[in-house]
């Protein structure tokens, strides 16, 4: 897991996004992201550490796609921004897997390896079919 988190951190920095891993947050506090300044704050004390790669990729994508903090401002519909960030996170994790020569027989194995929530499996399927 450290390797994928390091890769994601480097990806964020390469795209002008700061990243903070905060160990002082409570285990149930969600991670967050900001557009100005471009920043992802990751709760590294999250109760399920295995979910951190997906969460980190998700928050990075909020910043990349301009949907960070939008739900607080009510600028756009929450569902579309969340779906975009979820799909972007899946794409980032697939890119990491390809660049590190990881292979999976099924997309379920890929999803399990990165603790992608089951409710987002349809995004993996749709992305791979469209690709």
Image: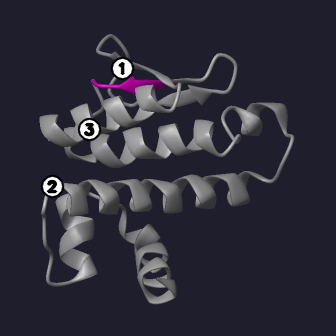
Q: Which residue is mark 3?
A: 7
Does label 2 or label 3 sit earlier along the sequence?
3
Element carrying mark 2 = loop
Query: How far is the residue under mark 1 from the one under mark 2?
Result: 32 Å
Residue 71, located in which quarter of the rendered image? top right
Q: Which residue is mark 2?
A: 100
Element carrying mark 3 = helix
Sort mark 3 into few (<14), some (14-19) or many (20+) by Cα contacts within 10 Å: some
Q: Is 95 left or right of 1, judged from the image as shown?
A: right
Magenta span of residues: 40-44
Camera-side mark, 3 or 1: 3
Does label 1 or label 2 sit earlier along the sequence?
1
Q: Where does the image place residue 64, in percent across and percent down from the top left? A: 60, 41
Q: Which residue is mark 1?
A: 26
Where 12 sits versus 102, above or below?
A: above
Q: Are marks 2 and 3 in contact (CB under 8 Å)?
A: yes
Label number found at residue 64: none
Is residue 41 shown in magenta? yes
Query: How far is the residue under mark 3 from the one under mark 1?
Result: 25 Å
């Amino acid at each position: 897991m450290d390797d994928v988190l390091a890769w994601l951190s480097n990806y964020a920095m390469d795209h002008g996004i700061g990243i903070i891993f905060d160990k002082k947050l409570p285990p149930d506090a969600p991670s967050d992201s900001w557009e100005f300044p471009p920043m992802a704050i990751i709760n590294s004390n999250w109760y399920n550490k295995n979910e951190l790669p997906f969460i980190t990729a998700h928050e990075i994508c909020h910043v990349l796609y301009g949907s960070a903090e939008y739900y607080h401002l009510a600028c756009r519909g929450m569902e579309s921004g969340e779906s975009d960030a979820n799909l972007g996170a899946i794409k980032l994790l697939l890119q990491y897997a390809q660049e590190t020569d990881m292979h999976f027989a099924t997309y379920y194995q890929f999803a399990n390896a990165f603790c992608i929530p089951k409710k987002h499996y349809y995004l993996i399927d749709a992305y791979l079919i469209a690709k």
